[in-house]
Each structure stands twice: as structure tokens, then as C-alpha cells.
Amino acid sequence: MTDGGHFVYMLQCRDGTFYVGYATEVARRVREHNESAKGAKYTRGRRPVVLVYYVECDSRSEALKYEYVLRKKSRLEKEQLVKEFAEELENKSEVLL
């Protein structure tokens, strides 16, 4: 995962809920959610959180629009997206082996 772009990401919290956000550095942002007061208020009481999905967008504007769309998806739609993302990562890792 490269940093410095425009990313929309989804975390799964300890209680099973999802949190959607925007970041330019996903790894740093996930650390903030887990370790510092800079994490979103929503995730502070639901630590630890795990990164379950991310996508890079071409611009900040595009990322913020997609973040809005992703937040509005139902839980089932988010679960399906996470499942497809995990399968895609698994397929990519098999190619590398």
C-alpha cells in the first residue's frame, strides 16, 4: 500500500462495526485510530481496529465523494466489499508465490 495518495479506507472495530474514512497515509491513519487521541472519536472506544478495505483515488475530491458513497452503503454491502477485497488480495499474493 503506497502512501501519499488519496485513499478511502474501511476499518473493522472490535465490536464488529465498520468505520469509513479518508487519508493520504493509510498506515499512519490506522495507527492513529489504534494508538492516539488523533483517531476518530467513534473508534477510540472500539479499539483495536483492523484495516479491511482500501482504495486509492485519483484526487482528494474523488476520494471524498467515494467516502460519502461508501458510508451510505448497507452493512451487507460493506461486508461483500470486504470479502471481495480479501479475495483479490489473496489472488495477488498467490501470483507472487
Image (spheres, rainbow, N blue to C red):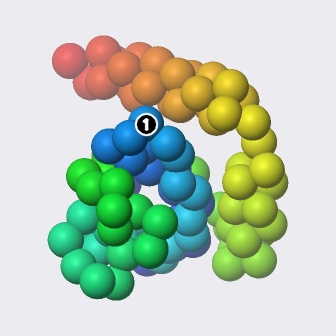
User: Helix, strand or loop at disc 1?
Assistant: loop
Q: Is residue 84 left or right of residue 86?
A: right
Where residue 56 appears, as percent x and y from the top left, is: 57, 58
Q: Position of residue 94 (x, y in %)?
A: 30, 15
The foreground one among 9 and 73 is 73
Which percent across, then down, holds residue 61?
77, 77
Q: From the viewer's perspective, tell me whether residue 41 is left or right of residue 94.
A: right
> Does residue 17 sit above or below 9 in this rendering?
above
Residue at 77 percent across and 62 percent down: it is 68
Between 48 and 93, the residue placed more toward the observer is: 48
Residue tagged by mark 1? 16
Residue 25 visible within the image: no
Q: Which amino acid is tagged 1?
A: Gly
Q: Is residue 17 left or right of residue 80?
A: left
Q: Residue furthest bottom?
A: 38
Q: Which quarter of the rendered picture does the N terminus lie within?
A: bottom left
Where residue 22 appears, x then y in whole percent?
57, 69
Instruction: Name the residue rendered at 63%, 23% in the picture.
Output: 80
Question: Does 37 sit above or below residue 33?
Answer: below
- Image quadrant occupied by the C terminus: top left
